[in-house]
Amino acid sequence: MARLQILELPTEHHGDDMVTPFVLVIDKVQNPESMLDFLRDPPHLRDELGARTILVFDEEVEIPANETPVDPDGYPLEIRVEGDFEQFREQVQDEIRKAQARAAEALRRT
């Protein structure tokens, strides 16, 4: 049975919008030629899906980014990531001081 996978490409910035482009990967297709014919039939299918391209393979293709790491017992490995907010706090306080200085300067001028 055919499988669908998504291969995410590096995120792009378009103004204020962040876009994560992707490639649609269809593997384990028993008859790749007929699948390619189907994909060519509506030529706008790729655009409707938003994919950069669609890749079709008769063999199984493993995408490392889609693998779920497992612990020694075979259970999905959970990773907890905690942000370092100390530097962020300093940056915010610095921006507040700059804004207060600009506001004070504007008040002095009036």
Image (cartoon, rainbow, N blue to C red):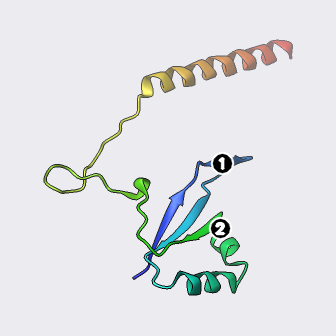
Q: Earlier in the sequence, mark 1 or mark 2?
A: 1
Residue at 51 percent of width and 20 percent of height: 90
How many labels sit on residues?
2
Q: Is residue 7 above or below residue 91?
A: below
Residue 51 visible in image = no
Q: Which amino acid does the dot numbered 1 rest on?
A: Glu
Q: Position of residue 26 (x, y in %)?
A: 50, 73
Residue at 78 percent of width and 14 percent of height: 105
Q: Is residue 58 above or below residue 92?
A: below
The N terminus appears in which quarter of the rendering?
A: bottom left
Mark 1–mark 2 distance (CA, rounded to whole Å): 14 Å
Secondary element at tag 1:
strand
Q: Quadrant of residue 21?
A: bottom right
Q: Are marks 1 and 2 in contact (CB under 8 Å)?
A: no
At label 2, counting other C-alpha atoms closer than 10 Å, the crowd grade (few under 14, some 14-19, many 20 or more) is some
At label 1, counting other C-alpha atoms closer than 10 Å, the crowd grade (few under 14, some 14-19, many 20 or more) is few
Q: Which amino acid does the dot numbered 2 rest on?
A: Gly
Q: Position of residue 98 (x, y in %)?
A: 67, 18
Query: Which numbered circle lies on residue 70?
Result: none
Secondary element at tag 2:
loop
Residue underneath mark 1: 12
For residue 97, side relative to residue 62 (left or right): right
Residue at 36 percent of width and 36 percent of height: 82
Q: Position of residue 62 (x, y in %)?
A: 41, 61
Q: Name the residue at the right extreme.
A: 110
Residue underneath mark 2: 50
For residue 66, side relative to residue 38 (left or right): left
